[in-house]
Image: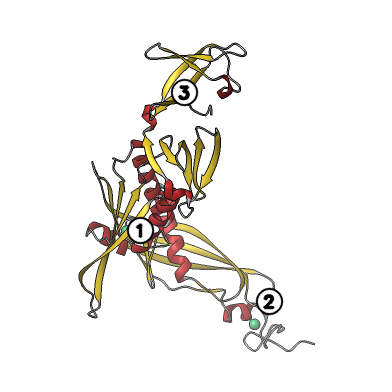
Amino acid sequence: MKAPCYLCGEPASLDGLCIDCYNKEHPLIEVSTPLTLVACKRCGSVKIPGGWKKLTLEDANSEDLWPHQLDILLDSEVKPLGQEIEVIIEEEKRLDKVLHVALRAIGKSHQDLPAHEEKYNVEVRFSYGTCDTCGMMSGGYYEATLQVRADGRQLSEDEEEDIVRTVTEMTVAQYGHDDKAFVTKISSDRYGLDFQLGSNHLCQSIADFLESQYLAERKQNYKLVGQDKVGKDKFRITILIRLPRFGLGDFVKVLGSPCQVMAMGKSGLTCFDLVQRQRFTMNPKSSKWQTLEYLASKDEKREFMVTTKVHGQPIQLMDSKTFEIRDIDENNLETIDVGNIVYGVFLEDEFYLLPTE
Ligand SMILES: [Zn+2]
Ligand SMILES: [Zn+2]
């Protein structure tokens, strides 16, 4: 025989209460009404205790922002009290700046009790402001400048494109993690590229990446720009990344031997030795690297057509532009037939055939 519920007299199940009375005394969630949703009018971020929460890039591009903004607000405003809680948001009525929603909470008020559903009516009032990031961006705020140059030459178009894309992708990747992950200004002139970045941290990681990707030189400068509220010196950093004189496809000399640059990146510089006819990779710390010299631009390469190939005789190549015929040693050509297009280059008055790939 169960004791009666002390509130309603029905048979009690838990703590002297029947299931209904227990559930009423122990709601599944706690949420207040009305709620105010403060959104950034520029980017749609939502103000929550401790800062602004950004929409994901996908949500920020959707037609209606409010459902995503409401999710963020409720995520911070709805306090789950029971167990295995699921909250379903149902739109009841939407006016310009006021939204009425019903929250259906499903879950258990106690682990020994079955799940049930509760309904909460919440009024949401919209208000607009400017988030920290948009405020800093519109104020031209920046902590760091990244300058990209090339040693003794201009950046190539490919390099410029690749670097701008890298900066953009790495900035976007920090969206939502770093409030200062934005680019205030990009400028390009005959000296190279300049980026003003909101975040010093972001600037450092971009510089790290470019330094290793391009086997570049790096210099850092700090400039005192004033003091913060507590009188601590504030610095602005400038990082200079200087790309080497040579780029992909250019010709260099290593240990006195002419080579073509085949690849560059984290693992080092891969060259094709035009005399030994083999590839090798070296990194900036190696002793070989110390002998590295720039020879010529990739634009020096010339196109030829194989016109004659007879066993035991020199192979004849015809320059595609001048139609001049040139004889080369048969040993140089492994897998080439008459009619093939090949590339060669004159370096310090010597002719070299370039690798076929
Ligand atoms: Zn009861
Ligand atoms: Zn914003």
Q: Are marks 3 and 1 in contact (CB under 8 Å)?
A: no
Residue located at (30% from left, 64% from top): 132
Of mark 3 and mark 1, the one earlier in the sequence is 1
Kindly identify which residue carries mark 2.
111
Q: Are marks 1 and 2 in contact (CB under 8 Å)?
A: no
Kindly identify which residue carries mark 1.
203
Q: Above or below — where is 30 with respect to 133?
A: below
Q: Secondary structure at mark 1?
A: helix
Q: Above or below — where is 190 with respect to 290?
A: above
Label 2 – label 3 distance at C-alpha: 77 Å
Horizontal side of 116 relative to 186 (left or right) equals: right
Ligand 2 lies under 8 Å from the Cβ of mark 1: no
Amino acid on which the number 3 mark rests in the picture: Tyr
Q: Above or below — where is 244 with respect to 350?
A: below
In this orientation, does residue 35 appear?
A: no
Residue 335 point in image, percent of width and height: 61, 21
Residue located at (33% from left, 36% from top): 157
Residue 74 point in image, percent of width and height: 46, 66
Foreground residue among 353 and 98: 353
Ligand 2 lies under 8 Å from the Cβ of mark 3: no
Which label lies toward us, 2 or 3?
Answer: 3
Kindly identify which residue carries mark 3.
343
Counting other residues with Cα less than 10 Å from the Cα at mark 3, is it few (<14), some (14-19), or many (20 or more)? Answer: some
Label 3 – label 1 distance at C-alpha: 40 Å
Label 1 – label 2 distance at C-alpha: 50 Å
Amino acid on which the number 2 mark rests in the picture: Gln
Q: Quadrant of residue 301?
A: top left
Q: Which numbered circle lies on residue 98?
A: none
Horizontal side of 67 relative to 131 (left or right) equals: right
Counting other residues with Cα less than 10 Å from the Cα at mark 2, is it few (<14), some (14-19), or many (20 or more)? Answer: few
Residue 32 point in image, percent of width and height: 43, 73
